[in-house]
Amino acid sequence: MKPVAKPNLRNQQRVDVATKITIEKPDGCCLTCSVSNMSRTGVMVSCDQETIKELIPDQRAPAPGSWISVKTRFSVPVIPTQPVSVIADGNIVHMRRIARDEFQVGIQFAEFEGNGFDYVDRYVGKLLSDARNPA
């Protein structure tokens, strides 16, 4: 039997991003957090302890396969003067405490609505290009 290769989530380059993100739980509860960084496959989000208690009641990093399903909404400036909204289903796959009241949550994208993946792909690609070719 051929072994199944696990996807390497670290192979996507991340870019630092400072924007707000709304995370919707399956019960419809919506929480707002800040995006720390983004890649084509997911986002790293910063939030406080109250938000973590809502998202991850036991406050433990999800075990592989026991991920927490969420829906995310955020904007990216595909055209500088016209940000577009991105809606993506995803899974909380990572959680760690950074400070007393600061946590980071990793959300892996699972499915985008509409052209969401294209918008994220273009935005991340532009930021990576800008970082490699500073003006």
Image: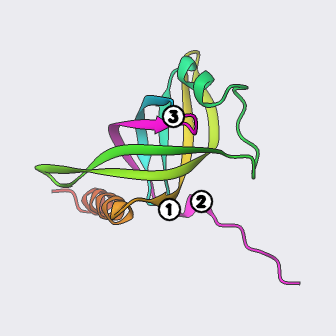
Q: Residues within 10 Å of mark 3 (few under 14, many from 20)?
A: few
Sequence-wise, which precedes: disc 2 or disc 3? Answer: 2
Q: Residues within 10 Å of mark 2 (few under 14, many from 20)?
A: few
Sequence-wise, which precedes: disc 1 or disc 3? Answer: 1
The kind of residue on which mark 1 rests is Gln
Label 2 and label 3: CA atoms lie apart by 28 Å
Q: Residue furthest right?
A: 1
| Looking at the image, residue 122 lies above or below residue 104 | below
Label number found at residue 12: 1
How far from the left and from the top, in percent, is residue 127? 29, 56
Q: Quadrant of residue 49?
A: top right
| Looking at the image, residue 55 lies above or below residue 84 | above
- Judging by the rendered image, the residue that carries numbered circle 2 is 9
Q: Residue furthest front?
A: 27
Report the residue at 24% width, 58% height from top: 130
In what element is the residue under mark 2? Answer: helix
Assess whether mark 2 and mark 1 are in contact (beta carbons under 8 angstroms): yes
- Judging by the rendered image, the residue that carries numbered circle 3 is 28
How far from the left and from the top, in percent, is residue 125? 32, 64
